[in-house]
Image (cartoon, rainbow, N blue to C red):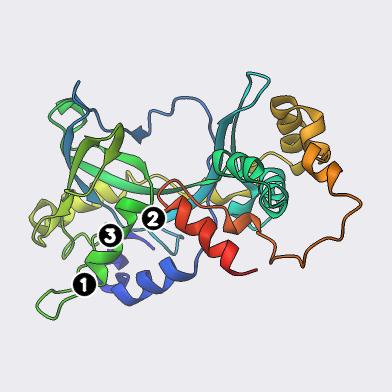
Amino acid sequence: MSFANLKSNRDTIQKLVQAAEATGGGGEKKSYADDRIWKPTVDKAGNGYAVLRFLPATEGQELPWVRYWDHGFKGPTGLWYIENSLTSIGQPDPVGELNSRLWNSGIESDKDRARDQKRRLHYVVNMLVVQDPSNPQNEGKVFLYKFGKKIFDKIMDSMQPEFADEKAVNPFDFWEGADFKLKIRNVEGYRNYDKSEFAAPSALKDGDDAQLEAIYNQLHDLAEFADPKNYKSYDDLKAKLGRVLGEEAIAGAPTMRQEAQMNTPAPAPMAPATAEDVPNEDDDTMSYFARLANED
């Protein structure tokens, strides 16, 4: 929609919550450095701070975010596999299929490989940099911002508060949204976002329509992240996976233990894992695989 229609046709919190629970899709067009994408800066201790404002959907788009999955791991050949997953656009993916086969083998070393090769979840939004102490030249500019499940959970918490004295807030709203205070800490070698929080709701740029329209006109189109033409084909991905892991691994050659068990009766099969079952980087991996085991 145009900016002129945005104020009277703003997304409701209920619509965004329902979409978050139901939608899939998303992908990434570029594998090289993209100057449209903002990345936080951390100090030597691994700490970082910035204030961001998430922005509404662009004209012609239903939602202000898009999500996608990718894989990133190093194979025994020394080569890296860093590619978007076709599961992002609802198609079979060779890594997801391989991970399912590895997990369903029932062999612990195969499960370890599936863990190492699991898909990772990303979200992409438009946002305005309100404060960036490490890079003040970014302030006042519109960027794309990619993040994982932890930050998205905070967005969902703002739209679905747990307690009766908390008011639901649509953080993507120009007039009734809220700034997001991104607080990054280094916890046991990993980035931690637990202290990040939303400020009190307030109109961006004091609700000045001229300034808001100027920001709206700078929004980046998110459609490319969900466009199948920006994904490699299944065959291309499988060929690369073969180069990274070795063709024998892709062909599904039996392990030594499997060869020893070929002449013994097979146990009742457990429910097979699917590409969608592979956890993202923010999932509790051990509880995930424990849940799968209980489905036997």
Task: Classify mark 2: helix, strand or loop.
Answer: loop
Q: Position of residue 95 (x, y in %)?
A: 67, 43
- Mark 2 vs mark 3, foreground winner is 3
Q: Is residue 97 above or below residue 44?
A: below
Q: Is residue 100 above or below residue 253?
A: below
Q: Position of residue 272 (x, y in %)?
A: 70, 62
Q: Amino acid at mark 2?
A: Thr
- Please tell me which of labels 1 and 3 falls first in the chain: 3
Q: Is residue 68 above or below residue 174?
A: above
> Left or right: 128 with respect to 114?
left
Q: Position of residue 175 (x, y in %)?
A: 16, 63
The crowd level at tag 2 (other Cα within 10 Å; few <14, some 14-19, many 20+) is: many
CA gap, disc 1 and disc 2: 26 Å
Pointers 1 and 2 in contact (C-beta within 8 Å): no
CA gap, disc 1 and disc 3: 10 Å
- Please tell me which of labels 2 and 3 falls first in the chain: 2
Q: Which mark is residue 12?
A: none
Task: Classify mark 3: helix, strand or loop.
Answer: helix
* Residue 121 visible here: yes
- Pointer 2 residue: 58
- Pointer 3 residue: 155
